[in-house]
Amino acid sequence: MLCRLGGRSVRQVSAALLRASGPPLLPAPTSGAQRPALPLWSVASVSAVGASGWYEALAASAPVRGAEEALLAAHAATGLPWWGSILLTTVALRGAVTLPLAAYQHYVLAKVENLQPEIKSIASRLNQEVALRANQLGWSKRVARLTYLRNMKRLVSELYVRDNCHPFKATVLVWVQLPMWIFMSVALRNFSTGAAHSEAGLSVQEQFTTGGVLWFPDLTALDSTWILPVSVGVINLLIVEIFALQKAGMSRFQMYITHFVRTLSVLMIPIAATVPSSLALYWLCSSFMGLSQNLLLRSPGFRRLCRIPLTKSDSDTPYKDLFAAFYTKFLLRK
């Protein structure tokens, strides 16, 4: 039965598969050579998820439609093949949106770091004052401790307000970058399956079948070579390791978070191997831009350009120090 489905649209194929009792893999239609089969979950029409499904709501949401329109506009304006349009759109979004937010994140964290000597001085004086008052009024250790913590929190908050650098502001990058990544991924998935919520949805899917390059000419098929998926995992691991190398003496909690992100980076490899190549390509471009952004923000010249305050942990030779730390940790390990 599966062989007779080659001439139908993806929506017809999905409906037929839902009625059939055959195997869960669907060979994508080809004009010649056999393409790698996509898992049913990655090619099924959004309508197959269910009218009340959360994914259908996400796939039809305004942000995803906006991402679809942005991709269509970039493709129409540049005339590039779809692989080039995906790459260009990713670079433009990361450069125009996430790079400024990342610079602002470093700005806030630098100001917080420069406040640490003052915070330590306040903590020392407050500890002495609380101890003196506890002796005078006969406070228990618990009451003294709660009094110290409450006043310390208030004083530190006043410092953050004074210097306009509350650490929560440094999280704005995550709250923007993660949703943008999700919306773009869903939009590309919609294009790859013909489920896009635009008039060009089905025609874009046909263009995607020949819109790739090199070893992935068909952007609707998965990458059977695993080059894209493995590259995604490796670059994400590099980002994690660069972060870990620049953090000397991490706390136990930070170590747990680092190991967790390492695990996620490895898990991205099999996940990227089971989605259309358009998604894997976008994830690779996004991760590469993230790595480049991370390295750029270590440059003393770029930090000065962004008016990021100088801190004690800054180095005049960050790339040399990074290479030396990498060499010591990984190449000299016996």
Image: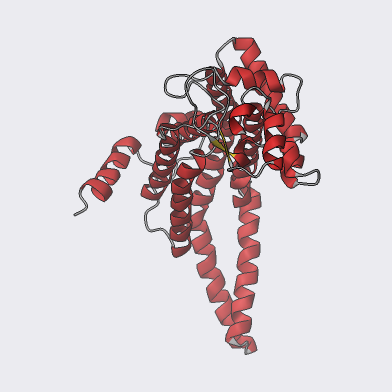
Question: Toward which corner of the image does residue 80 lie, by quadrant?
Answer: top right
320 versus 52 height, above or below? above
Image quadrant occupied by the N terminus: top right
Q: Position of residue 115 (x, y in %)?
A: 52, 53
Q: In the image, what residue occupies the spot 43% across and 51% down?
A: 262
The residue nearer to you, when weighing 163 against 84, is 84
Number of numbered discs: 0
Q: Position of residue 110 (x, y in %)?
A: 50, 45
Q: Position of residue 169 (x, y in %)?
A: 63, 46
Does residue 189 appear in this view?
A: yes
Q: Position of residue 220 (x, y in %)?
A: 57, 27
In the image: residue 264, left or right of residue 176 = left
Protein image colouring: secondary structure
Q: Point out the residue furthest to the bottom here.
A: 138
In the image: residue 193, left or right of residue 107 = right
282 versus 7 height, above or below? below
Question: Toward which corner of the image does residue 4 lie, by quadrant?
Answer: top right
In the image: residue 147, left or right of residue 197 = left
Q: In the image, what residue occupies the spot 53% across and 50% down?
A: 112
Question: Toward which corner of the image does residue 85 lie, by quadrant?
Answer: top right
Image quadrant occupied by the C terminus: bottom left
Q: In the image, what residue occupies the spot 24% across and 48% down?
A: 328
Q: In the image, what residue occupies the spot 60% across and 81% down?
A: 144
The residue nearer to you, when weighing 127 against 181, is 181
The residue nearer to you, when weighing 116 against 254, is 254
Does residue 133 appear in this view?
A: no
